Image (spheres, helix red, strand yellow):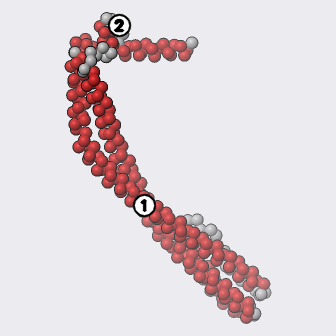
Amino acid sequence: MTPRDLLAVSPEFLAKAILHRREKIVDSLPSQMAKRQDERQIAANLAKDSRAKRDDLISKVSNLKKERDEAQTSANQIIAKLKILSDANSTNQFTKLIEIEKLDDESDKDSLLNIENLQTEIDEHKNWASKNVESKEISDDLDEMRKNAKKLLEAGKKAHIALMELSKENNKVQSIWLENESHRRRCESRYTKLARCKKESDSAIEFWSAELTGDFSELLLDSKRVSQGGLSSRSLMKQNSGNKKSRRKN
């Protein structure tokens, strides 16, 4: 259709055509929005549930780390005292019992092995003390220290093993949550687009319904200018844009 053909179409006809199109859109939207709303709600529930599981797992991991680290710190303190007391009461020093370094990686199997080795060395220290420490009082103190250290190491070991297991589950739960959250956002976006379309269509219906009761004088300003040989609104926009660029250069 040429510009001349468009100018030949009556404003009332164009207004009614636009109004009819918008009304058809509005009529079709409720069922679509209801469907998208159901999808949106289901997706939101899935994302909420998976997030709750993720947060619960994070809390468990945090508690286990705290339990493990506290047990490790206390065990290290006892081991340090144990070595000092052993060395002070024997000419033959016990060269093992190296304190555990801080465990940062809950899936680190080498760290678990270090704990188990230290437990074994505590047992070895018992045999060493029976041969190298003469004082019964000191031997009893060392025995009590070993028991406490082993108890703490066992608690830390159990927490560390639990962390190793949870780290596997954590990756799975995190992946599920990310997938569900991504799906929720897509559903939210689809519903939002329909809601925006309805709002725009309602505004258009209101506008064109009001125009049909008038004389279209404001809407015909551009048409009259073009019919009288003037520039179209598009040409005017280009002209104004060119003038602005020219002023910037100057």
Q: Which residue is mark 2?
A: 230
Q: Residue at x 29, y 28 (%)?
A: 206
The amino acid on which the numbered mark 1 sits, given as a three-letter code, is Ala
The amino acid on which the numbered mark 2 sits, given as a three-letter code, is Gly
Kindly indicate the quadrant of the structure image that contains residue 174: bottom left
Query: Compared with residue 76, is residue 33 higher up or lower down, i.e. above or below?
Result: above
Looking at the picture, tell me which residue is in the foreground, 31 or 170: 31
Q: Earlier in the sequence, mark 2 or mark 1?
A: 1
* Label 2 element class: loop
Query: Compared with residue 35, is residue 117 higher up or lower down, i.e. above or below?
Result: below
Percent x, y for residue 213? Answer: 25, 20
Q: Which residue is mark 1?
A: 52
Q: Is residue 87 visible?
A: yes
Query: Quarter of the image containing the N terminus?
Result: top left
* Label 1 element class: helix
Q: Residue at x 60, y 82 (%)?
A: 150
Q: Residue at x 57, y 75 (%)?
A: 156
Percent x, y for residue 123? Answer: 62, 86
